[in-house]
Image (cartoon, grey):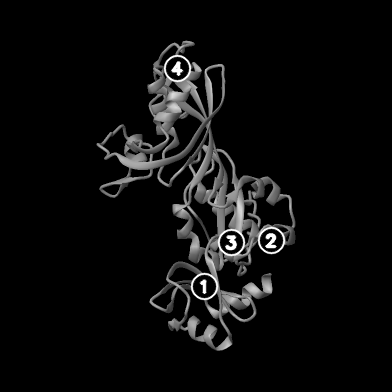
Amino acid sequence: MAKAERPARVKIVRRPLHGVLLLDKPLHLSSNDALQKVKWLLRGEKAGHTGTLDPLATGVLPICFGAATKFSHIHLDAVKTYVAILKLGVKTSSGDAEGSVIATRAVTADMTSQAMLDMACTRFTGKISQVPPMTSALKKDGKPLYELARQGVEVERAAREVVIHKLVIERMQDDELQLTVTCSKGTYIRTLGEDIGEVLGCGGHLISLRRIATGDFEIDKAVTLAQLEALSDVAREAYLMPVDVMLAGYDRVDLDDENAGRFLSGVRRRTELKDNEFVKVYGPKAQLLGSAHIKAGELIPTRLLSPLDIGQIQQNF
């Protein structure tokens, strides 16, 4: 009996795209898998994201295409805001719903009184110290901690200082505590949840985590994978924001044609402007040339777009 022929694979023709798409990452999908799906849907040649969001978390994940990837590192340090739900009275091996239950305690009214909740918010606002969980992507001797955890291995981890800019308890119902947390990079929300549970006296674990903002990027501007899949190529591309959204907050400097050409060649330019670490530079046609800093009367290139990138961006937008 003849074997059935496999259908021919459709070759995806990649294209140069430049800009930023805000994805509302779905549950149970890694940041890299989400990136690859978006890249495939938009047929982009080059893409990256601005920092990992756990598979068990949903929410804002900026996807950078083309020239925008040159500035993705800037948003690694961005302040993040999360909405988290903590299940009190139950501790798990991982600090979240994926782990096995390792302890249970009764949740009494005095543990969740307004005074206790206010105390917890005060205790964990500002600079705090956290021990990274074994389920994190930090590495020990070249191996991610989560791989060691899967093998049942636990290693000593040094505490790290993070900043909780704002911590608000939004709701307490059925032993579930909903929090809104605005924090620095490197903050482990599951660890924060566990620590809050311990301070309240009942323990707890994270059952839901949603990132609603990273830097200036907010969830109301994000699009889901399902929405993207339902759109045409042209409609998908309409979700791309210009490359310079990555440089929001940077001061703008405009150059004439001659100085723009020299700047793009990496040559420092004289300026009367004051020292400034964060500058975005534009050419005579309002095209972004790159980022720079000003020191001792010189405009010094930091990250430059290529002439090819600039030409393609002018066509896209």
Whether residue 101 is visible to the viewer of this picture, yes or no, is no
Label 4, label 1: how far apart the Cα atoms are: 51 Å
Residue 220: give x, y in percent of width and height. 66, 46
Disc 4 to disc 1: CB gap under 8 Å: no
In this rendering, position of residue 235 left or right of residue 159:
right
Using the numbered discs, state the Cα–Cα distance from disc 4 to disc 2 in whole angstroms.
Answer: 46 Å
**Circles 4 and 3: CB atoms closer than 8 Å:** no
How far apart, in angstroms, are the residues tagged by discs 3 and 2? Answer: 16 Å
Amino acid type of disc 3? Val
Seen at 52% across and 74% down, the residue is: 305
User: Where, quadrant-wise, is the C terminus in this rendering?
Assistant: bottom right
**Residue 53, horizontal then vertical, whole percent:** 49, 45
In the displayed structure, does residue 306 sit left or right of residue 300?
Answer: right
**Which of the two residues, 62 or 213, is positioned nearer the viewer here?**
213
Name the residue at 40% across, 45% down: 186
| Gap between marks 2 and 1 measured at Cα | 23 Å
Mark nearer the N terminus (2 vs 1): 2
Q: Nearer the viewer, residue 34 or 264?
A: 264
Q: Amino acid at mark 1?
A: Gly
Residue furthest toward the bottom? 258
In primary-sequence order, the first of circles 3 and 2 is 2
Disc 2 marks which residue? 237
* Residue holding disc 3: 245
Label 2: element kind:
helix
Q: Residue at label 4?
A: 89
Label 2 Cα crowd, 10 Å radius (few <14 / some 14-19 / many 20+) = many
Marks 4 and 3, the one that precedes in the sequence: 4
Give the spatial CA distance, label 1 vs label 3: 12 Å
Q: Position of residue 64 (x, y in %)?
A: 55, 60
Circle 1 is placed at which residue position? 290
